[in-house]
Structures are given as structure tokens and as C-alpha cells.
Image (cartoon, rainbow, N blue to C red):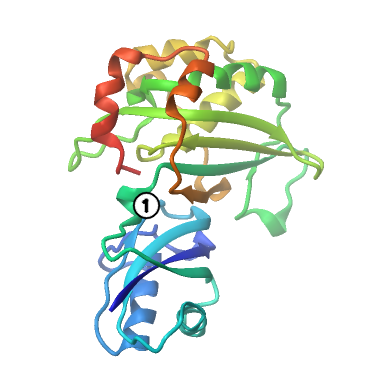
Amino acid sequence: MRRVAAVVAYDGTNFSGFQLQEGVRTVEEEIERALARIFKEPMTIDFAGRTDSGVHAEGQVISFSVKYDTMEDHDVKNALNANLPSDIYTRRVRTVESNFNPRFAATRRIYHYYVLNTRDPDLFSRNRYWWFPYPLDIPRMREGSKYLEGIHDFSTFMKKDKHEDKNPVRILFRVRVIRLRRPGLILVRVEGQSFLRRMVRNIVGALVRVGTGQWEPEKIEEIIRERSRTALNTTAPPEGLYLYSVDFKPVPVNRYLKTAYWSENHLREDLFCSRADS
């Protein structure tokens, strides 16, 4: 048997997240069910990152073993798409090393978050963007975003789970706030090695507070230093969030740290303990 990696996209609207959960519909469940039909036996997959209920993906990466030697990569792709539901699509498949696991091999994960900043909602896109009808100051949001880049303890931005005790130290390579060509559509692009649960949505919620003028841009650094979830009582809804892509190439970490506005470099050693969390 050989190992393959597949890039999959999905509309998260009707899923209770990616990871398998008993009694609810998940992306992992649907993919493993499709693979079981193809290979006539139960199958399990590895994946690059978990996404919550309602969150979408354009570039989630999974890996699994191919039972039949006669199946080429394009055959696996076609077989998967023939057996997957209409809200999941396999974009490409490639052969990888036998021990490849996207969770541990990933060097960068990129999330996109879309805010529709218009007076009236777009009813036909309500599961694709966060409709926010109040004025947003993009330059202020960009000013606030620079405080997020670098190595930090992101306890303020994580959802606590009594069953998990994750290291809150993460590195963000770059955070960008971009006004797109579609009138009123704003993209927040967040690049990092790994992420805590709801971290991106909480980051967007904080930047929107800066954009409305409720907070000064410097407030972002202040709440990071507080290291307390109570310092940020806002979060963006799930429908605007997409796991855009996963990178496996070496990342010039030191270059990003040099360009970051500030970085808690004394936390650098803690960073290695959190690489596979997402």
C-alpha cells in the first residue's frame, strides 16, 4: 500500500465541525465513509487541522493509505469525488512518503476570514461571510494587526476546554486586512504555524472592535499581555472563516520574527511544544 495526501474543500454549513463526533455529521465521517466504500473496509484519515461547526475549507489536507496498487493518484481523486456528498470536493491527490502525517508535517496554516461590511445583507451569502453593517476603519485594523505578529502567549484568544490543556504559545507570521474588489468585502488573512481553538475568530472579533473605534490599535498588545480570555469578550461567527491552505515547505521563521512589531522571544522554546495543535 502507498500513502497519499489529498487537498479537500468543503462547505461547513451543514457540518458539526471536521473531527469525528458521535451522533452528529462531520467532514471526517463523510470522507472515511467514502473511503470505506471505495476500499471495501473501514478507513481512517489523518488531517492537518480541525475546523469548528460552520467553518469552511478551501485547502484542508488529509492523508490515508491506498489499498489497490492499480489506482493512480487521479483515480483516487475521481473515486473520492464519486462517493463524497456534494458539500465536499477533492481538489487533488498526490503520493507521499509512507509516514506522512499532515498534522505534524505542516509548517504553515493560512486562514481567511471574510467580513461583508455593507448596509444591507446579502441573503444568498449569509453562510459565507460575516455581515457587519457598521462602519469599519481599515487602516486602524491594519495598525492593530501588527501587534498580533510574532511569538506570543495567545491565552486571551483561545477557547478553554476542560478536557484539553494546550500550550497557548503560538507564532503568527503575518496578519493582513485587505479590502477586496467586491464592494464592502473585507478579508482578514492570518498565517501561522498552528492555532488554538477559535483563535482566528477571536482575532477577527478584536480587530473589528478596533475598526469600529471601540478600541485603539494598541489595545491589541494590551489584551495579549493580559493572557486572560476575560480580556476579550467578543468573537466572530463561524460562517466567515475558511481554512485556506496548508504549507509543508520550510518557513523562514527568523525572517518573520525580525519584521514583527514585537515578539515575546523568551517564549521561543515553548513554541516547539505546540507545533501540531490546530
Q: Secondary structure at mark 1?
A: loop
> x, y percentage for residue 104?
30, 48
Image coords of residue 178 (percent x, y) = 70, 33
State the residue in front, 270 or 240.
270
For the question of whether residue 26 can be seen, the reply is no
Query: How many marks on residues?
Result: 1
- From the viewer's side, name the closer residue of 100 and 113: 100
Please say if 245 is above or below 65: above
The residue carrying pointer 1 sits among few (fewer than 14), some (14 to 19) or many (20 or more) residues within 10 Å by Cα, namely: many
Tell me where residue 26 sits by quadrant: bottom left
Q: Callout 1, which amino acid? A: Arg
Q: Residue at x 55, y 76 (%)?
A: 86
> Could you tell me which residue is drawn at 71 percent across and 56 percent down?
123
The image quadrant where one finds the N terminus is: bottom left
| Residue 163 in which image quadrant | top left
Along the viewing direction, whichever of 236 and 102 lies nearer the viewer: 102
Looking at the image, residue 128 lies above or below residue 39: above
Describe residue 162's horizontal placement relative to residue 264 as left or right: left
Quadrant in which residue 34 is drawn = bottom left
Q: Is residue 146 left or right of residue 263?
A: right
**Residue lying at 31% horizontally and 75% vertically, measured from the top left:** 2
Look at the image and tell me in which quarter the C terminus lies: top left
Q: Position of residue 113 (x, y in %)?
A: 58, 42
On the rendered structure, is 80 left or right of 275?
A: right
Quickly name the residue at label 1.
50
Residue 7 appearing in the image? yes
The x and y percentages for residue 108 are: 45, 41
